[in-house]
Image (spheres, coloured by chain):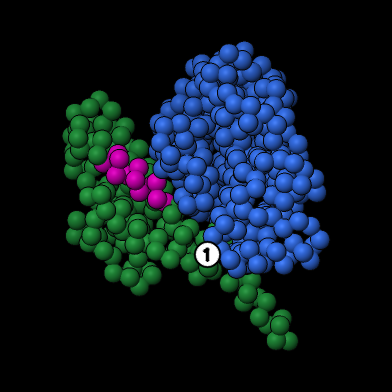
Chain colours: A blue, B green
Amino acid sequence: MSGKYKKVAYYPGCALEGTGHAYNRSTKELGKALGLELAELKNWNCCGAMEVKNVDPKLQTYLSARNLSIAEDMGFETVMAPCNGCYHNLKKAEYDLEHDQASREVNARLSEKAGHNTYAAGKVETIHALDWIKEAIGEEGLKVRVKNSLKGLKVANYYGCMYTRPRHIFPEKDQGPGSESTSKPHFMDDLLAAAGAENVDYPLKTACCGGAHTLSDSDTSTKLVLNLLTTAEACGADVIATECPTCHTGLEMHQVRAEKVLGRKTSVKILYFTQLLGMALGLSPRKVGVHENMSDSSDLIRAKRLA
Amino acid sequence: MAEVRTRSLDEASARLDEVVAAPDAELVAAASGLANELLALGEATLETWLIARGETPTDRTVEGFRLLALHRQGARGEPSFNACRETCRELVYHHNLVRLDPGNPETARRLRLGAMVGKHLALFIGGKLEVAGLGEFCCSSRPLRQSEAQPAETM
């Protein structure tokens, strides 16, 4: 356990204020239960998500850099972003500002125009919620705090595509033992195993959820999600643990749609890893926002005595 | 291999569905051949993407596997294609598990999971082909918006 991440700046991002609210709630409650502090960025803005990034990548770099400059102004060296999209974009901005002169110029120009400090690479470290718990508490720290072991719960850990790609924007990953792997991520597996869960060997843990297809080609998204769900079931999983609000919402929505449109019913449950860890620490399902999920996990939670 | 190369994406998907649905005994009896076939179906899937882009699929290998070389070729100039990088590696992994130990009690399950991984690859590439005319996969609407914006600007 390290004191380094005991108090960090918190960047929830847009999704966690909408469809991913359960992730926001459970992240905050989990932090509280573990004695960790989060200070939300003041007046944060969109990270640039997919839309801005594709229209103007340098504008996306600026938007993410503005959030990093707010963290710096608030006196933080670390900002934690639980959403994979936000995490990815903040990392990308950091990389671009370090390696691309044109990005630095655009960032400086827009920052000046907007009247705030220009963020320079290397001032603030961006971490994911998984890094936060792993580093600040660690597996041993979690084990001693577990009140409701997840023993007997078979979990497929699903990381999605943005947590590890592209590799070059995550220089801290793939650094050998103890670091996260971009080809076979394991931080979520490690944390849930520490809480007693039995992780299944899920071969699609970083595969595409079809998130970007959702509006333009829903059928493709539904088929991709159905394959993720049926593969998790074939692995023997009771639940898919998620760490991205886009993936999570996609899995939930298309689980329903697969049944309606394709007549394929799947029963695997979908919960954020923060919800599972929170319940393992003795927090009620309500406290970690299980009622805010679209997917109903109440039967499983009762059966595993997590309520 | 040549036979598989002629398969369309739909045919490859249908064959993968057959493997997923096959009884254990059938899978175990043909384990090594099926492991090779799964790999070849993955290659055929990647070839579809490359041919659609007007490229000649490579016959080279990466780490001993043509599948990985095809993926590398397909991702050139198309960063979002890397979203199937680990899917390809998982396919190779499941192939290796079966080939190295075909008598393992887990063989049928491994083949079935390998087929599901192959299915994901086919779905992913099918989706990419579907939206290829619209632009980048991650936020596919860019050129669409541009073309919509064009008449308004010229009005």
Residue B64 is covered by the magenta coloring:
no
The reply to whether residue A45 is visible in this rendering is yes
Task: Look at 61% across and 33% down and name the residue there.
Answer: A132
- Where, quadrant-wise, is the C terminus of chain A in this rendering? top right
The chain ID associated with circle 1 is B
Horizontal and vertical percent position of residue B29: 18, 34
The reply to whether residue A272 is visible in this rendering is no
Q: Secondary structure at mark 1?
A: loop
Horizontal and vertical percent position of residue A213: 55, 56
Q: Where does label 1 land, which residue? A: B136
The residue under label 1 is which amino acid type?
Answer: Glu
Task: Look at 40% across and 60% down and name the residue there.
Answer: B75
- Magenta: main secondary structure: helix
Horizontal and vertical percent position of residue B95: 26, 41
Residue at the bottom extreme, as displayed: B155
Q: Is residue A286 above or below residue A294?
A: above
Q: Which residues are magenta?
A: B84-95
Task: State which quadrant residue A107 falls in.
Answer: bottom right
- Where, quadrant-wise, is the N terminus of chain A in this rendering? top right
Task: Look at 37% across and 69% down and name the residue there.
Answer: B52
Q: Is residue A209 above or below residue B108?
A: below
Horizontal and vertical percent position of residue A122: 61, 49
Is B101 or B61 nearer to us in this picture? Answer: B61
